[in-house]
Amino acid sequence: MIYTVTFNPSLDYVVGLDKFIPGTVNRAASEHIYPGGKGINVSVMLSHLGYESRILGFSAGFTGRSLQDMLKYHGCPPDFIEVKEGQTRINVKLNAGEETEINGQGPTITGQDMEKLYQKLDILQRGDWLVLAGSIPGSVPRDVYERIIERLYKKGVHCIVDAEKELLMDVLKYKPFLIKPNHHELEEMFGKELKTQEEIIRHARLLQEMGAVNVLVSMDAEGAVLATGSGEIYQRNAPKGRVVNSVGAGDSMVAGFLAGYLQTGDYEKALELGVAAGSATAFTSWLAKKEEIYALPAKEMTPA
Ligand SMILES: Nc1ncnc2c1ncn2[C@@H]1O[C@H](COP(=O)(O)OP(=O)(O)O)[C@@H](O)[C@H]1O
Ligand SMILES: O=P(O)(O)OC[C@H]1O[C@](O)(COP(=O)(O)O)[C@@H](O)[C@@H]1O
């Protein structure tokens, strides 16, 4: 079974504007509200690709209830722990030629709430998959990802982590099956600009030396590079298309990679489905459907 954990789910309020001028009243040309949060997006995309998963996480307040309703409507009912203080955040995504995001802080998660999550995670068994993705609210101890993976690593659960900086660095010693920093997150982790593909590959390999088994570095319109646990390096270009809303592209890539790997056991094919899922999502208003993903030309993804 695949489990995803989203500590900080959201409603994503995606606003399209012809032009955004700070300090003035701006009028939206379009507006949509979608379920959001990294693990949740991974689960929804997995379901689009035909894989069932269990959605764990925390929700709060009226926004949390709306999020649960939306996920049920989309055929992915969550198994959230409802917390008492605060609200599930509303993340604002402004799309005015370039994309600007304001992500909220999220509700207060107490020690008791955390205990409930640990109880749910106790049922995971050898061979299960766990995706830990996204930021954690300020009320949660910073080492929470590390604590969870430490418990499950010993049981033989395959872990995938998509998070920033220390959250990611701290879990490497527990040999996660996959981590997916984007190009900028990789630069932030090492505190330097990485200009060439060779530099990106070298730093992906450094993360492997620190413990990560497979490192997938996404590079938005430039596609992605994968350093595998068996020593290969694979690269795929992103197909070309008109970007409609790239929110969720990274999460779609993680889901596509996992689905591709489970389907074929082949890293190169997993990378290809990951890139296709990410790009198809960027080319549509929300998370892409299976038909949209498979309609993308595989030829464009193959490196010259
Ligand atoms: N502008 C784009 N054109 C084509 N594909 C894109 C674009 N933006 C994202 N993608 C696809 O989605 C994947 C993940 O996107 P990226 O922006 O790197 O991740 P994240 O959302 O985590 O920052 C990319 O590797 C690529 O396949
Ligand atoms: O937990 P964080 O890092 O604030 O990110 C949450 C945001 O990221 C998303 O999951 C999208 O992530 P990606 O664009 O990286 O795939 C949104 O749905 C959500 O608003």
Image: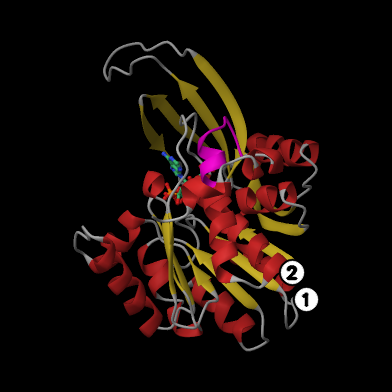
- The answer to whether residue 107 is above or below residue 123 is above
From the viewer's perspective, is 23 left or right of 27?
left
Residue 98 position (above or below residue 16):
below
> Mark 1 = which residue?
123
Q: Position of residue 44 (x, y in %)?
A: 69, 47
Q: Residue at x 59, y 67 (%)?
A: 111
Quarter holding the C terminus?
bottom left
Verify whether residue 280 appears in magenta.
Answer: yes
In the image, the segment drawn in magenta is: 278-287
Asked if the residues shown at circle 2 and circle 1 are in contact, with their CB atoms under 8 angstroms apart, the answer is yes
Query: Mark 1 falls on what kind of element?
Result: loop
| Element class at badge 2 | helix
Q: Looking at mark 1, is its residue's CB closer than 8 Å to ligand 2?
A: no
Residue 28 percent across, percent down from the top left: 46, 14
Q: Residue furthest bottom?
A: 154
Mark 2 neighbour density, 10 Å: few (under 14) some (14–19) many (20 or more): few
Q: Amino acid at mark 1?
A: Ile
Kindly identify which residue carries mark 2. 120
Identify which amino acid the numbered label 2 is placed on.
Lys
From where the camera sits, is residue 219 visible? Answer: yes
